[in-house]
Image (cartoon, grey):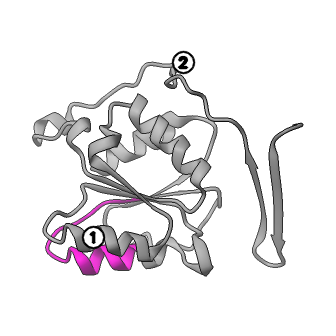
Amino acid sequence: LAGHYLEHSSTEGRGSRFSMSVPIALTPIAFTQPVVRSSDLATVGLSLERLYVVVVEDNLAVQASIAGVLRAGGYDVENNVRFATSVTEVKAIFDRMPHRAPNLVVCDFRLQEGQTANEVIRLVDTAFDWETVPVVIFSAEIEPAVDLGRPHTRVVVKTGNPLTLLGEMERAV
């Protein structure tokens, strides 16, 4: 992988993490399979381009990749998707629009400074105690320590197939 950034870190008892940066394609993602939409969103008056989504991911390259997947999947990324790298940034987003609960939060499990998706979930539940906000944990960890007893919480393992994330996002809302 000449010319690409590659990083590895390992913590005993927690596992290893490999990160690699590669150039981002300038052209939109072309799915090899058609994106199949359920009719459920339309029946409750929602459409993908109108969904307000907050994505919490501390790796900016992964953020850019998620933005491309969402854009290709029909989401209005420029107007209705907000990105954060930490719980502090998520709180700032929520503080700017305290009366508008996101339709969905997508969050990596492990974040900066030892934070996890559990702190994001607590913040979501505190900030919008009047609304149930679905949370999709999008993680490379096979079994992140997430309380799946919370209603509307899903875990998606990061794979090479972007349709997996899109499908779980749609099922969550």
Identity of the amino acid at label 2? Answer: Thr
Q: State the image coordinates of residue 84 (x, y, percent, origin top left).
A: 44, 62
Q: Secondary structure at mark 2?
A: loop
Q: State the image coordinates of residue 118 (x, y, percent, origin top left).
A: 46, 76
Determine the CA span between mark 1 and mark 2: 36 Å
Residue in front for this viewpoint, 119 or 60 = 60
Residue 31 position (above or below residue 1)? above
Identity of the amino acid at label 1? Answer: Phe
- Residue tagged 1: 94
87 sits to left or right of 13: left
Residue 155 position (above or below residue 148)? above
User: Alpha-carbon neighbours of circle 1 within 10 Å: few (<14), some, or many (≥20)?
Assistant: some
Image marks 1 and 2: residues in contact by CB distance under 8 Å? no
* Magenta part of the chain: 120-136
Q: Which mark is residue 36?
A: none
Residue in front for this viewpoint, 108 or 98 = 98
Q: Quadrant of residue 115?
A: bottom right
Which residue corresponds to the image point at 32% horizontal and 61% vertical from the top-left?
A: 152
Residue in front for this viewpoint, 127 or 118 = 127
Q: Secondary structure at mark 1?
A: helix
Q: State the image coordinates of residue 113 (x, y, percent, origin top left).
A: 61, 79
Q: Which mark is residue 32?
A: 2
How many marks on residues? 2
